[in-house]
């Protein structure tokens, strides 16, 4: 009888401390920061498939897209993630901005409507996130209303955060400015386009996963 009780208790505690089988990992940030590029690189590295399309036109990703059971291995340890790529967060979406990229008015208006809905959906999906990677363009000023709003939402929900300063391959990249803007968070600089510094990224990702 005592042995049965011990085995029962052991099973209960092992279930509690085993942790989640799959970590929901959200990619958030302003438009064109490189969220989908980074999500694509991770998924391509570990599943051989990309998650979505990228383009120079803002709000190419206008709906939440995800890939489940992405198993990542780093230094002998394995973790399984649900990669959730979200539309770029913006405080204002104007169809006329898309017309600068030679989109016709009707197409630009449709894109703006879809992008606006995408922002709403992205915020809703925060409730399902175990951890979030905030992807910022390291060539741009990080002290923006959008970035502060994103971080504020994550703080309010007590979601673990890793900040990625993307596009370090570009001459105007300034990672120290990103670090100064958000000193309470870990910041890692990468080039999602060229796969630069991904080793450090994965190391940071596994640290983030421990907090999830």
Image (tube, rainbow, N blue to C red):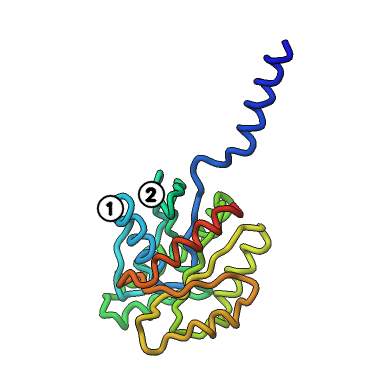
Residue at x-position 38% and y-position 78%? 167
Q: Helix or strand or loop: what does disc 1 sit on?
A: loop
Quadrant in the picture for residue 59? bottom left
Residue shown at 58% from the left, 41% from the top: 19
The number of callouts visible is 2
Q: Is residue 101 visible?
A: yes
Query: Where is residue 13 drawn, in percent x and y?
Result: 66, 32
Q: Residues within 10 Å of mark 1 (few under 14, many from 20)?
A: few
Q: Position of residue 195 (x, y in %)?
A: 33, 69
Alpha-carbon span between mark 2 and mark 1: 9 Å
Which residue is identified by label 2?
A: 67
Q: Quadrant of residue 88?
A: bottom left
> CB of mark 2 within 8 Å of CB of mark 1?
yes
* Residue 82 position within the rendered picture, expressed as x and y whole percent measured from the top left: 45, 48
The structure residue drawn at horizontal position 41% and vertical position 73%, both measured from the top left corner, is 190
Residue 37 lies in quadrant:
bottom left
**Residue 49 disc label:** 1
Residue reaching furthest to the top: 1
Task: Indicate the secondary structure of the residue bearing disc 2.
Answer: strand
**Foreground: 53 or 82?**
82
Quadrant where the image shows the N terminus: top right
- Residue at point 36%, 84% (across, down): 170
Is residue 165 shown left or right of residue 7?
A: left
- Give the camera-side residue of 9 and 64: 9
Q: Is residue 124 visible?
A: no
Q: Earlier in the sequence, mark 2 or mark 1?
A: 1
């Amino acid at each position: 009888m005592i042995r049965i009780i011990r085995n029962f208790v052991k099973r209960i505690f092992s279930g509690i401390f085993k942790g989640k089988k799959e970590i929901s990992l959200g990619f958030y940030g302003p438009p064109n920061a490189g969220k989908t590029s980074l999500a694509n690189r991770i998924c391509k590295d570990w599943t051989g498939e990309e998650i979505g399309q990228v383009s120079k036109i803002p709000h190419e990703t206008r709906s939440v897209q995800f890939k489940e059971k992405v198993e990542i291995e780093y230094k002998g340890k394995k973790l399984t993630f649900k990669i959730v790529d979200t539309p770029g967060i913006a405080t204002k979406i104007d169809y006329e901005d898309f017309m600068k990229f030679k989109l016709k008015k009707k197409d630009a208006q449709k894109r703006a409507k879809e992008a606006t809905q995408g922002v709403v959906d992205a915020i809703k999906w925060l409730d399902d996130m175990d951890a979030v990677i905030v992807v910022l363009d390291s060539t741009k000023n990080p002290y923006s209303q959008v970035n502060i709003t994103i971080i504020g939402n994550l703080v309010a929900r007590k979601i673990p955060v890793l900040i990625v300063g993307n596009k370090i391959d570009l001459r105007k990249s300034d990672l120290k400015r990103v670090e100064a803007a958000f000193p309470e968070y870990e910041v890692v600089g990468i080039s999602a386009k060229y796969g630069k510094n991904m080793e450090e990224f994965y190391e940071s990702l596994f640290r983030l996963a421990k907090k999830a």
